Image (cartoon, rainbow, N blue to C red):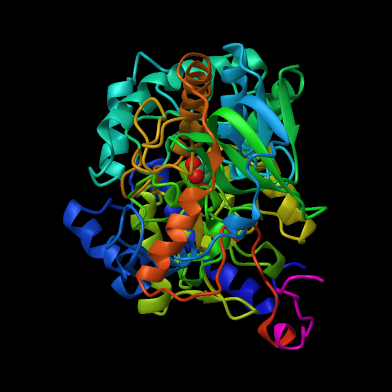
Amino acid sequence: MSYPPELKELIGVVEKTRPERIASKKKGEEFPFMSLQEREDMLRYHPDYREEGRRALKVGPNKDYRVAHEFADMLEARSRVDPAAVDCSVVDMETDVLIIGGGGAGTAAALLAEEQGAKVVIATKLRHGDANTMMAEGGIQAATKIEKDTPCDHYLDVMGGGHFKCDTDLVYTLVSQAPDVIQWLERLGVMFSKFPDGRLKSIHGGGTSRRRMHSCGDITGTEIMRTIRDEARNRENITVVEYAPTVELVLNEHGHCAGALLYNLETEEYYIVKAKATILATGGCGRLHVQGFMTTNHYGATADGLVLGYRAGVEISMLHTVQYHPTGAVFPEQAEGLLVTEKFRGAGANLLNMEGKQFVNEREPRDVESAACIQECLVKGLGVTTPTGRLGVWLDSPMIDILSGEGTVNREFPGKSILFKRYGIDISKEPMLVYPTLHYQNGGLKINPGCATSVPGLFAGGEVTGGVHGENRLMGNSLLDVLVFGRIAGQNAAVYAKETAGEGKLTLNHVRAYHQELESAGIVTDRVSPVLLPDYTDPQVRKRQLTSHYVGTLR
Ligand code: MEZ
């Protein structure tokens, strides 16, 4: 399906303004960046700043903290199991380190834990690698060009991007370990985009003061996940259990984490895994569609780890913000929500309204850029309407070939070029239509720089955690986050398993206590969480689904 005639006509408007925009770029003239005050004013249009989008939690360690209704619904829900029905003394599997989640953070953790001599189990909801890491496109930040960049510059960018709300110790760890992570990935076999002389290519991302975005074309996450997953699958002491989401953590009688209750998606059986140390690496929340937004996230991104950790008593941090990536596809319909990497803007593509006019510098921090797109479409009425009634703005990808030479788009963006070719669109010749899309869980479980949570024996790493990105993450710091903190979590969990973990009777008492707290707060609900998978059933269809579920005692 190529663009219909009415959109082709609007592309004609974009083509008319292009030569002048290209000429300005070539002269080094940029669309002006906003001042700090202008950015602050623009953020009024960002969904995080809609007070009606959130409510105060009534239970748990962060009682009274305001988070999006979609998070509150998950956190103010009952367990999927009746704790009285689970016999925790029947242990189905035992290991040193249990890792919940088989994405980038979980897999990196497994590798480092195994290197400490630990026996490791990765339990994952879908297949190993079905995760947001696999879907990350444009890059990973690291100050590798020491003649022009330092971890200190990287630190300042992260802090500024996050509105100076970041956890400074976590940021220090993130940026100082970044160059080592790139070297580690190269040693494992990741094929980064390079110049013919072997130097790593690097470009700018929104909000970065230096060119420190390293990439593997526009499939950086896939290449990293491919490499670390292969490595994990080839190590004898790492066992992967697929299609086995965790529905509760299991604590011991001393309140220490001692494993988890897993659910077999195929047989619907529950299993107890006993572990000396446990790592939550369940990723993000896009499939909760916070404030009704489409999402870039993989099918299993339903904030499971957040629920499990919170119920066990771990505080949350920065969960009042989520990230809307400025450029999610809105045409064609089957691509709605899909990430169109920021690397397009890093390579020079402008964002344009229906009049073909640039309305924002393409390298503002993500929250500001998204707010500007929303303002253009919803407030100024200058968005382009798609055949399905969505609004979007143009991302002028053909500029890249004009600026950097014919063939650049196909070479640097193979993933998106191939995808759009299937839809009859050549993105080196025609722009894409985009709108902000729910991309990242900025906040999450609170950890210290060693990835320990407040529950002994429970560690966490990657998108399930919160604090390092403050109120807004910059491009390329999520792949970095999952690898830096995944590795630390793995290493420290293995050491904990070896040196600190003790024995104790396994229980789900924390779940019982949480249920009681819900009742005391007057929350009467049949909602259960974690939800595990999104439900896209049309309400009309749901009304006709009459199968009843037996909930009594079978005789
Ligand atoms: O860090 C990200 O979210 C990222 C690199 C996304 C992208 O635009 O490619």
- State whether residue 21 is above or below residue 78: above
Residue 96, located in which quarter of the rendered image? top right
Q: Nearer the viewer, residue 498 or 407?
A: 498
Q: Please report the residue visible at 36 percent of the width from the left and 56 percent of the height from the top.
A: 60
Q: Is residue 247 visible?
A: yes
Measuring from the top left, give residue 476's x and y in whole percent: 47, 37
Foreground pick, 277 / 202: 277
Q: Look at the image and tell me whether residue 220 can be seen.
A: no
Quarter-of-image position of residue 184: top right
In the rendered structure, which segment of residues is drawn in magenta? Answer: 542-555
Residue 438, horizontal then vertical, whole percent: 50, 59
- The answer to whether 174 appears left or right of 83 in the picture is left
Quadrant occupied by the C terminus: bottom right
Q: Nearer the viewer, residue 346 or 305?
A: 305
Q: Which residue shows up at 55% across the image and 47% down it?
A: 341
Query: In this rendering, would 238 be left or right of 514?
Result: right
Please determine whether, in this image, residue 386 is positioned above or below residue 442: below
Query: Which secondary structure type mostly characterizes the magenta part of the structure?
Result: loop
The residue under the point 75% across, 41% down is 242
Against 315, residue 478 (above or below) is: above
Residue 226 rendering spot, x and y as whole percentages: 71, 30
Q: Residue at x 42, y 73 (%)?
A: 523
125 sits left or right of 482 in the view: right
Whether 554 is among the magenta residues is yes
How far across and how far down the image is residue 75, in percent?
45, 61
**The stretch drawn in magenta includes residue 191:** no
